[in-house]
Image: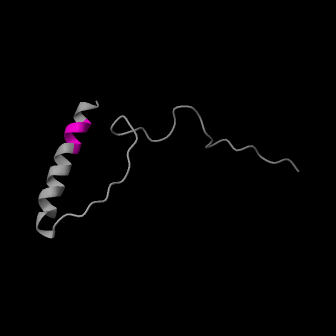
Amino acid sequence: MKKKKETRGGSGRGQGRHLKYGEETVPVVIRVPVSKVKEFRQYAALKLSEWLQGSS
């Protein structure tokens, strides 16, 4: 009995998720005072959006 050849999937050049900021990223974990968490997240979101616009 012949095995049916798959017609989907596989790998190819240039496939996969593209880099959001134009370079590799790593998770960063830091400790922030509880009272400053909201302010820190707003600052981080602002900086990330600036970097995202700069890499377009």
Picture residue at 26% right of the left edge, 37% below the top: 52
Where on the picture, by quarter, is residue 17? top left
**41 w.r.t. 4: above or below:** below
* Residue segment shown in magenta: 48-52
Residue furthest bottom as drawn: 34
Q: How is the image coloured?
A: one colour
**Residue at 33%, 38% in the rendered image:** 21
Residue drawn at x 61%, y 43% is 9
- As drawn, 53 above or below 48: above
- Note whether 56 is above or below 9 in the view shown: above
Q: Is residue 29 left or right of residue 53?
A: right
**Which secondary structure dominates the residues rendered in magenta?**
helix
Instruction: Out of 26 and 54, give the one closest to the viewer.
Output: 26
Q: Give residue 56's position: percent from left, percent from top.
A: 28, 30
Residue 1: percent from the left, percent from the top?
Answer: 88, 51
**Residue 10 appears at what percent x and percent y?**
63, 41
Q: Is residue 7 left or right of residue 45?
A: right
Q: Is residue 34 above or below residue 54?
A: below
Residue nearest the viewer, comparing 16 with 48: 48
Would residue 33 be counted in the magenta stretch?
A: no
Report whether 42 appears left or right of 25: left
In the picture as drawn, the residue positioned furthest to the right comes out as 1
Query: What x and y, as percent, mark residue 42?
Result: 15, 53
Q: Quadrant of residue 40?
A: bottom left
Q: How many marks?
A: 0
